[in-house]
Image: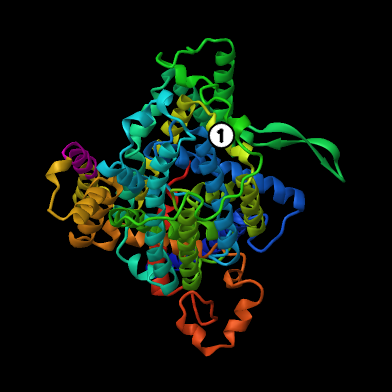
């Protein structure tokens, strides 16, 4: 017994020593963990938060950087639409379209930053509306006449030619304006929270990936004008954006303390697309002046010459001022409206995700219900303005610029506001738009190879939130994507088989079922919400978790979402404000179930990032 007690005593002593050692280790671990957490939080903290105002020279530099980041995505849209609008051989009108889309993007950016969601988020054209727009313009009644495809037969100043493209543009304008009313309604009424309950990764992934996949034909046609030049452009963009992005370039700088000195600038990370286009453009110019490229328009490679567009820069005016109705009074096409609606819904889901990503990167709290509702509503107003001005497109939040916030660590909305003003000014310089239209066709094709490929992959990346070991999810995604490739292709080859006897209904069905994005999103939405599956399996809990983690990275109060000019203070004294979904109120907490459901589209921030 004695030996047993001694043994028990030794065991107790050993246990006590172990406990003390464990307590000390645990204390050290807690201190270490705490210091790591603090260091991690400091590292994630933006240099300038949403309400901060950087020095004026830094504001100007970063505003130009955001403009250049959005450049590739914005300029691509009018270049694609010009085919459906019969404008392939009218460079001067293409330049006016480029000026118009930059002007409207700047105007919508200013509206979004001041009256919308109030985050540092840039607005621009959306590829979600390109696919239904091209489907509408491919209908038999809107197909371009054969003579418009021949440059020798096109007289750009002819009233006949002007009427050909303007009738198509006016129909597209009216369809966008009517469809944007839904976005305005959904936003300002607060219905966006209800809609986001049913949209998960398995709806977003096929919808966004098919935006890029459906444009393979346009990319192939342009790249095929000269595969060597297109391949060179793509290789240059890949080299700059992937291999050289972390290599700094020393540039001269001046400050009061250091005087004239050099500083490191990550130029390849900031503007890879612009650099790739510029170098390829220069090579084409050299090959043109030395007559390496054929001057005969019938020979392969002629479209790579830089003098194909003639003297468009000289013909363009120095200043132009886009205005609503500049192409005539918009007309409404029912089939076009329904097709554009599919793109609008996709754009809304994408934007809600961008708001949460932008708030996380700029140190702001997760956006509350009233801010998201106001943001979507203002985007609807932006699409309405884009339709009225005649861009042939709508507006949405630019994911590429949200990513730039994480790189620069500058989340000031003053910078984005200045970038919007810069785009407004660029949109009024006619020569700038004309210069962009002289980019050789195969150079644009090389850019499209990169851009559309990344859009497709970004859509698929939303599947990371789902359980892809589940046969249910594999079936939903695989069937949705493959059906969206097969059905539109078959209908376009056999248009006579889709006839109900009602002309208007035939037009609606034709546009919807020839829009790859709609077909994929429809099947993804239907199957994901009807086939039994847990929220973990469907990826809904993962999106909620992302938003919950984002809420811990907050360096500002929710007042950043208040309306400017003292409007919020005036409204708070009114009792009826609580019933208006887009008005801020102090009893409006962002951590409610509806807000969490709205935040589930955070994964869509990858939708158009390049």
SS class, disc 1 = helix
For residue 9, what is the image quadrant?
bottom left
Residue nearest the viewer, comparing 138 with 130: 138
What is the image's colouring?
rainbow
Residue 164 visible (yes or no): yes
Q: Which residue is mark 1?
A: 436
For residue 437, above or below residue 307: below
**402 sits to left or right of 199:** right
Residue 393: x and y in percent read 44, 50
For residue 493, above or below residue 413: above
For the point 53% across and 80% down, the residue is 585
Residue 195: x and y in percent read 33, 66
Residue 599: x and y in percent read 42, 64
Q: Which residues are magenta?
A: 484-494
Residue nearest the viewer, comparing 35 with 244: 244
For residue 119, what is the image quadrant?
bottom right
**292 sits to left or right of 203:** right
For the point 68% across and 37% down, the residue is 265
Q: Magenta residues: mostly which secondary structure? A: helix
For the point 76% across and 53% down, the residue is 55
Point out the residue furthest to the front here: 159
**598 sits to left or right of 564:** left
Asked whether 217 falls inside the magenta stretch, the response is no
Residue 596 visible (yes or no): no
Residue nearest the viewer, comparing 15 with 211: 211
């Amino acid at each position: 017994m004695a030996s047993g007690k001694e043994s028990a005593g030794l065991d107790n002593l050993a246990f006590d020593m172990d406990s003390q050692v464990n307590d000390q280790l645990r204390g050290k671990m807690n201190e270490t963990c705490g210091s790591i957490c603090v260091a991690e939080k400091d590292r994630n903290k933006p240099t300038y938060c949403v309400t901060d105002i950087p020095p004026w020279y830094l504001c100007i530099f970063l505003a130009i950087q955001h403009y250049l980041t959005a450049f590739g995505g914005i300029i691509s849209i009018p270049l694609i639409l010009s085919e459906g609008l019969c404008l392939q051989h009218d460079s001067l009108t293409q330049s006016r379209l480029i000026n118009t889309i930059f002007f409207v993007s700047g105007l919508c950016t200013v509206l979004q930053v001041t009256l919308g969601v109030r985050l540092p988020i840039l607005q621009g054209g959306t590829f979600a509306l390109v696919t239904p727009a091209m489907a509408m313009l491919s209908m038999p009644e809107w197909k371009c006449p054969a003579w418009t495809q021949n440059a020798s037969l096109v007289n750009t100043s002819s009233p006949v030619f002007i009427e050909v493209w303007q009738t198509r543009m006016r129909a597209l304008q009216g369809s966008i304006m009517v469809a944007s009313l839904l976005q305005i309604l959904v936003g300002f009424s607060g219905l966006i929270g209800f809609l986001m309950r049913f949209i998960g990764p398995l709806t977003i992934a096929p919808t966004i990936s098919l935006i890029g996949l459906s444009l393979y034909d346009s990319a192939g046609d342009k790249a095929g004008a000269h595969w060597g030049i297109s391949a060179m452009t793509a290789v240059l963009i890949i080299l700059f954006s992937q291999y050289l992005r972390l290599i700094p370039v020393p540039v001269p700088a001046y400050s009061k303390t250091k005087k004239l000195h050099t500083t490191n600038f990550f130029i390849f990370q900031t503007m890879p697309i612009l650099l790739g286009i510029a170098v390829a453009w220069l090579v084409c110019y050299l090959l043109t002046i030395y007559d390496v490229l054929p001057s005969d328009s019938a020979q392969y490679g002629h479209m790579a010459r830089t003098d194909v567009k003639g003297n468009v820069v000289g013909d363009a005016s120095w200043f132009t001022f886009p205005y609503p109705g500049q192409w005539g009074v918009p007309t409404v096409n029912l089939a076009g409206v329904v097709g554009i609606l599919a793109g609008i819904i996709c754009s809304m889901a994408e934007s809600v995700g961008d708001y949460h990503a932008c708030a996380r990167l700029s140190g702001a709290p997760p956006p509350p219900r009233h801010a998201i509702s106001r943001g979507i509503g203002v985007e609807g107003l932006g699409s309405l303005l884009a339709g009225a001005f005649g861009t042939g497109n709508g507006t949405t939040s630019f994911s590429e610029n949200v990513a730039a916030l994480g790189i620069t660590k500058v989340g000031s909305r003053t910078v984005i506001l200045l970038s919007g003003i810069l785009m407004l000014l660029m949109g009024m310089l006619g020569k700038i738009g004309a210069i962009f239209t002289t980019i050789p066709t195969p150079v644009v094709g090389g850019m499209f190879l990169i851009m559309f490929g990344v859009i497709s992959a970004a859509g698929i990346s939303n599947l990371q939130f789902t359980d892809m070991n589940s046969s249910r999810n594999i079936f939903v995604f695989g069937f949705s994507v493959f059906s969206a490739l097969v059905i539109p292709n078959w209908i376009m080859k056999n248009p006579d088989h889709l006839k109900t006897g009602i002309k208007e209904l035939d037009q609606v069905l034709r546009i919807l079922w020839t829009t790859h994005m709609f077909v994929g999103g429809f099947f993804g939405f239907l199957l994901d919400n009807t086939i039994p599956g847990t929220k973990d399996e469907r990826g809904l809990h993962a999106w909620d978790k992302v938003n919950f983690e984002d809420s811990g990275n907050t360096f500002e109060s929710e007042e950043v979402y208040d309306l400017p000019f003292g409007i919020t203070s005036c409204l708070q004294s009114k009792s009826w404000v609580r019933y208006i979904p887009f008005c801020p109120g102090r009893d409006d907490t962002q951590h409610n179930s509806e807000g969490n459901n709205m935040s589930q589209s955070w994964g869509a921030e990858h939708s158009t990032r390049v």
